[in-house]
Image (tube, rainbow, N blue to C red):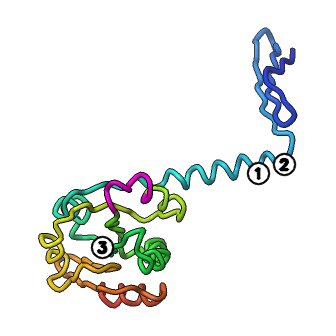
Amino acid sequence: MLHSFFSNDNFLLTKMTYSFLGCKFVKVKFKIRTMKHVFALVFFAFFSVQVSAQNPAVFDTYDALEKAVLNDKNTVYVVNFWATWCAPCVKELPYFERLNNENKKVKVVLVSLDFKDQFQTKLIPFLKRKSIQSQVVLLTDKNYNNWLSKVDQNWSGSIPATLIINGEKRVFAERDFATFEELNNYVNSNTN
């Protein structure tokens, strides 16, 4: 016996009940009638995974960020300080994303210095729109005089800025990178 319990022009969901040697069996079929709808389902499934990829942690102090995120002495960290409102920062983000994907010797951490009250309205949509996959944290510590020198004694506070942490060794660059190759070479020369 065949029952269609959901049907429209594009999808057909059927349940077939049959007996064999005294046992009752149920077979359920879901059929997509056009290739266009198969493509739409695959497209939706792929992008729904991408959109949910980022949920940045928020740290009110640099010390808390360092303790929670930059705490493994066996990991080489490439920490980029940036903000969505900083054009040079946004321009080089794809290079850090590529570094994160291709250079397996390092872990990229993107420290956003965006405003805390714009976390949901600016930062999260930006990360989704750009499909950022690297680890992102938001640092809301506005007491710059207390923490800038912990990153580097000579940091003026301008961004973009990058800190490489390799065990006890720290290398700081208060600059932007023009290409991925420039960034990758800089990281490799300071981590070997």
At x 63% / y 53%, what residue is drawn? Answer: 46
Asked if the stretch drawn in magenta spans residue 116, the answer is: yes
Q: Which residues are magenta?
A: 115-123
> Alpha-carbon neighbours of circle 1 within 10 Å: few (<14), some, or many (≥20)?
few
The foreground one among 157 and 131 is 157
Q: Amino acid at mark 2?
A: Met
The foreground one among 111 and 104 is 111
Q: Locate the C terminus and report the quarter of the image it occupies.
A: bottom left
Q: Which residue lies under the disc numbered 1?
A: 39
Asked if the residues shown at circle 2 and circle 1 are in contact, with their CB atoms under 8 angstroms apart, the answer is yes
What secondary structure is the magenta-colored segment mainly? helix
The foreground one among 120 and 97 is 120
In this rendering, position of residue 9 left or right of residue 156: right
Asked if the stretch drawn in magenta spans residue 181, the answer is: no
At x 48% / y 78%, what residue is drawn? Answer: 91
Judge whether residue 79 can be spotted in this image: yes
Judge whether residue 102 can be spotted in this image: no
How many angstroms separate mark 3 from mark 1 (CA)?
39 Å
- Of label 3 and label 1, which has the lower sequence position? 1
Secondary structure found at label 3: strand
Q: Which residue lies under the disc numbered 3?
A: 77
How many angstroms separate mark 2 from mark 3 (CA)?
45 Å
Name the mark on residue 80: none
Secondary structure found at label 2: helix
Q: Is residue 69 above or below residue 51?
A: below
At x 81% / y 34%, what residue is drawn? Answer: 11
Q: What is the tally of numbered marks visible in this picture?
A: 3
